[in-house]
Amino acid sequence: MTKKVRKAVFPAAGLGTRFLPATKAQPKEMLPLVDKPIIQYGVEEAMMSGCNQIIIITGRGKQAIEDHFDVSYELEKMLEERKKTDLLNIVRSISDMMYVSYVRQKEALGLGHAVLMARELVNDEPFAVLLADDVIDAQVPCLKQMVQVFEETQCSVIATQIVEGKMISSYGVLDVKPVQSHFGDRLYEIQNMVEKPKPEEAPSNLAIIGRYILTPAIFDCLARTQTGAGGELQLTDGMRSLLQKEKMYAYVYEGRRHDTGDKLGFLKATVEFALKRDDLGGPFREYLKGLKL
Ligand code: G1P
């Protein structure tokens, strides 16, 4: 029987130091791109890709994320009384979105550790992991593209993208071989992977991007993984041991990825998303044209 991806895990316990002081008293996942918190883009992508259960790994100071996906009685009552139906619908659609559960990661010990925290809720099913910082603008949601690969192969799938030059060292990097399939040159079989290698040691220019579909065998692998790069339990290291047991694929998704965890990336995403908006695009474009650059 073929398995389906129903659960999506969002590691969100990181401290967000790259965005201080904005993240001193507010989770980085709640910073808005135009008017929607970063994490909501990922949650909507998971939902559009067929997931109906969201598992968010939180930590201290992340209460605002729980409040965001919860019902806000006072706000709804006020909007109802003032007959602000459009706003009321927006607010309600967030809490109606789907079933969300939360697991506390007491200490930020790494991405692999965060994923391991979801073990009991995920149980014995394939599941998705989405890193909310990576906002991917695509016609077909990135995770949905990957779900198609999973449904055909029943193997773990990692999103990948070419990163040129020294920047490759900021990523997990894949060693791959091409696969003949109807996915054309987008699908590769993974041979090996390494977290944040030196540029001269990178096995290719294919970087791991923050979208994964993993089989539940990853949990045993992570539980046995030692701390790696940066003194953290790395998801990449756990996946490398999964590779000893199972086939894994890399998929070059169609779409445009924004690294919103980076200040410049965040600004670029803000501008691009604002320009696409029906209500803001026109006047914002006029404003930008008028700037003496
Ligand atoms: C994490 C992963 C890395 C991946 C990256 C994608 O790194 O550890 O393998 O390439 O996300 O955004 P981080 O950016 O959290 O340091």
Image (cartoon, rainbow, N blue to C red):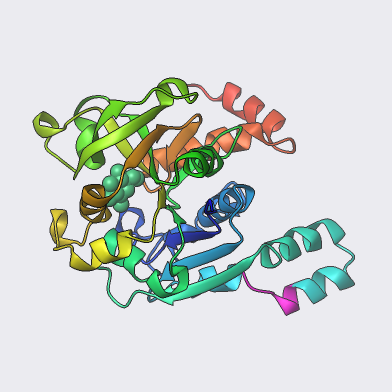
Examine the structure image and report whether residue 74 is included in the region drawn in magenta: yes
Work out whether residue 110 can be spotted.
no
Please state which of residues 158 and 293 is positioned toward the viewer in this rendering: 158
Q: Is residue 118 left or right of residue 101?
A: left
**Which residue is at a point 62% across and 69% down the rendered structure image?**
99
- Quadrant of the image occupied by residue 190: top left
Work out whether residue 76 can be spotted.
yes
Please state which of residues 155 and 292 is positioned toward the viewer in this rendering: 155
Q: Could you say where residue 141 lies in the image, as x and y percent from the top left?
A: 57, 40
**Which residue is at a point 48% across and 31% down the rendered structure image?**
256
With respect to residue 185, does 283 lie above or below? below
Q: Is residue 114 left or right of residue 181?
A: left
Q: Could you say where residue 80 lies in the image, as x and y percent from the top left?
A: 86, 70
Q: Could you say where residue 10 lies in the image, as x and y percent from the top left?
A: 45, 60
With respect to residue 279, does 83 lie above or below? below
Examine the structure image and report whether residue 73 is included in the region drawn in magenta: yes
Q: Could you say where residue 205 lies in the image, as x and y percent from the top left?
A: 25, 27
With respect to residue 285, does 277 lie above or below? below
- Quadrant of the image occupied by residue 187: top left
Q: Residue furthest front?
A: 1
Please state which of residues 14 and 203 is positioned toward the viewer in this rendering: 203
**Which residue is at a point 38% across and 76% down the rendered structure image?**
60
Numbered range of the magenta stretch: 69-75
Q: How many marks?
A: 0
Q: Is residue 262 left or right of residue 10?
A: left
